[in-house]
Amino acid sequence: MSKIGLFYGTQTGKTESIASMIQEQLGTDVVDIYEIADVTGADFADYQDLIIGVPTWNVGELSSDWEDFFPVLDDIDFTGKTVAYFGVGDQTGYPDSFMDAIGILEEKISALGGKTVGAWPTDGYDFTESRGVRDGKFIGLALDEDNQGDLTEWRIKTWSGQVKQAFGI
């Protein structure tokens, strides 16, 4: 079985905690985990299956570590790679840009050949707009630690089962 590369960025540590929970759920022997501030584009080459984690920062922006890495994405060949996304945001404080960051990254990586998996329902969330929604679903797991932290564990467990199928593990 091939390994999964999980690449995340974090500002406050929430996305890092979520990344560790996902790694635990999928298997520490299956998922290699990397903080985006500490990698190069070459680190993506070893993985056919990827998980990308990003918080939406400020009003619909990438976190500073992903913002710095964003131009490097152009030099990575995502052709044939399967990519799942998870995001951390605040639907109450930022209802007009909830989960925008996963949408920004997914748009770019898909244009570079990545195949997106792991869509998540928008039911149970209260937001008005999101760049992270396609065809009525989030393009990845949407987590709101500020307002719905009690649902995080269940959402990760449920989404991880879906991602396992998509990655064939």
Image (cartoon, grey):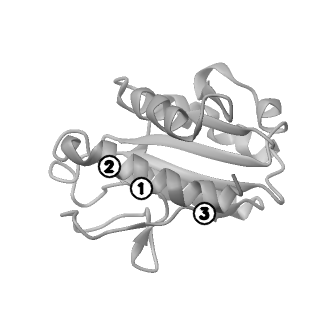
Q: Circle 3 — which element?
A: strand
> Which three-letter amino acid code belongs to the residue tagged 2?
Trp
Picture residue at 48% right of the left edge, 33% below the top: 19
- Is 165 above or below relative to 75? below
- Percent coordinates x, y for residue 49 in the rendering: 73, 49
In this view, the residue in front, 35 or 150, is 150
- Dividing the picture into quadrants, the one containing residue 108 is bottom right
> Which three-letter amino acid code belongs to the residue tagged 3?
Val
Left or right for 117, reference 48: left
> Which three-letter amino acid code belongs to the residue tagged 1?
Thr
Tag 3 residue? 117
Q: Circle 2 — which element?
A: helix
Tag 1 residue? 158
- Percent coordinates x, y for residue 58 in the rendering: 31, 40
Circle 2 crowding by C-alpha within 10 Å: few under 14, some 14–19, many from 20:
few
Q: Is residue 168 visible?
A: yes
